[in-house]
Amino acid sequence: MVAKVIDGKAFAAKVRAQVAAHVARLREEQGLQPGLAVVLVGEDPASQVYVRNKHASTVEVGMASFEHRLPAETSEADLLARIARLNADPAVHGILVQLPLPKHLDSDLVINAIAPAKDVDGFHISNVGLLGTGQKSMVPCTPLGCLMMLRDHHGSLAGLNAVVVGRSNIVGKPMAQLLLGDSCTVTIAHSRTKDLAAVCRGADILVAAVGRPEMIPGDWVKPGATVIDVGINRIERDGKARLVGDVHYESAAAVAGAITPVPGGVGPMTIACLLANTLTACCRAGGLPEPEGLTA
């Protein structure tokens, strides 16, 4: 068996095209332009790259992009005041504070200062609680992207056994909640799970989000299973740096029915879903129908 490769880059391009078409209709019919504000504190090189990519993608789909670059020594009070102004700005429908923040800033306090309706990262405690109780919320971008790809591949997910390896607040826990919402039977596993290999072998859907390079080999994968590899790990091999996932791709692809590659799988979906969330937030704020196929 050779697994079908789930092309996240192509799927993300399709999502961005859907978002752009909906944004164009909003601007033409409602005179409304969704706006995304990104706040970057400090000069972390990786964060600067992410912010540039988000700005370019936001503008590309016809949204307004508001960048707020603050020095690393910005006080907590000043950052919270900036967020309060963005919360009150009707032109801003989504707010994202780029993580990690400098060590003197309390990330939880900052995230929970964002208005829940504008929390397009889906990290606010109110959105976490709403998702956990099956109510309408803003959903974290990476799990939402995984769910979109799974729905596209399988159609209905009802009744499938899903194993999520990883219990982070950003991916593992919300991914499990989304799969429960689509009527999967869900197991959350982690590094201390007894006989993790056997647990993984029982999965029709295996989501790997542990941050350990190639931790899951092919013989942990059930024949025909769908493997979603969220991991992005930089390793040295044969004197060259390369990116690998949490799954050993070659051995897993020989067993699985479908698999996401790294890079080019889940990664491109994250920014695409950030744009989708911003569009959803704009529609909700205006009391307009939400975009079909772009929400959980």
Image (cartoon, rainbow, N blue to C red):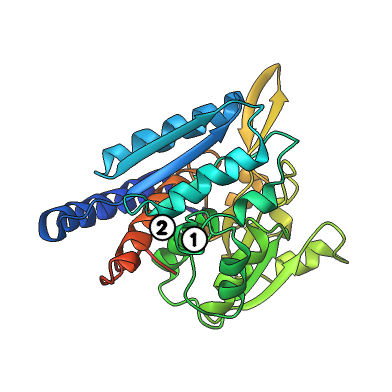
Quadrant position of residue 224:
bottom right
Where residue 101 sits: x, y (%)?
66, 37
On the rendered structure, is 197 left or right of 142? Answer: right
Query: The residue under label 2 is which amino acid type?
Result: Asn
Whether residue 45 is situated above or below residue 25 in the rendered picture? above
On-image quarter of the C terminus:
bottom left
Distance, label 1 to label 2, CA atoms, is 9 Å
Q: For mark 1, what is the residue?
A: 144
Residue 277, which numbered label?
A: 2
Q: Residue at x 26, y 72 (%)?
A: 289
Query: The residue under label 1 is which amino acid type?
Result: Leu
On the rendered structure, is 6 left or right of 244? Answer: left
Q: What is the secondary structure assignment of the residue under circle 2?
A: helix
On the rendered structure, is 141 left or right of 55? Answer: right
Label 1 close to label 2 by CB (< 8 Å): yes
On-image quarter of the N terminus:
bottom right
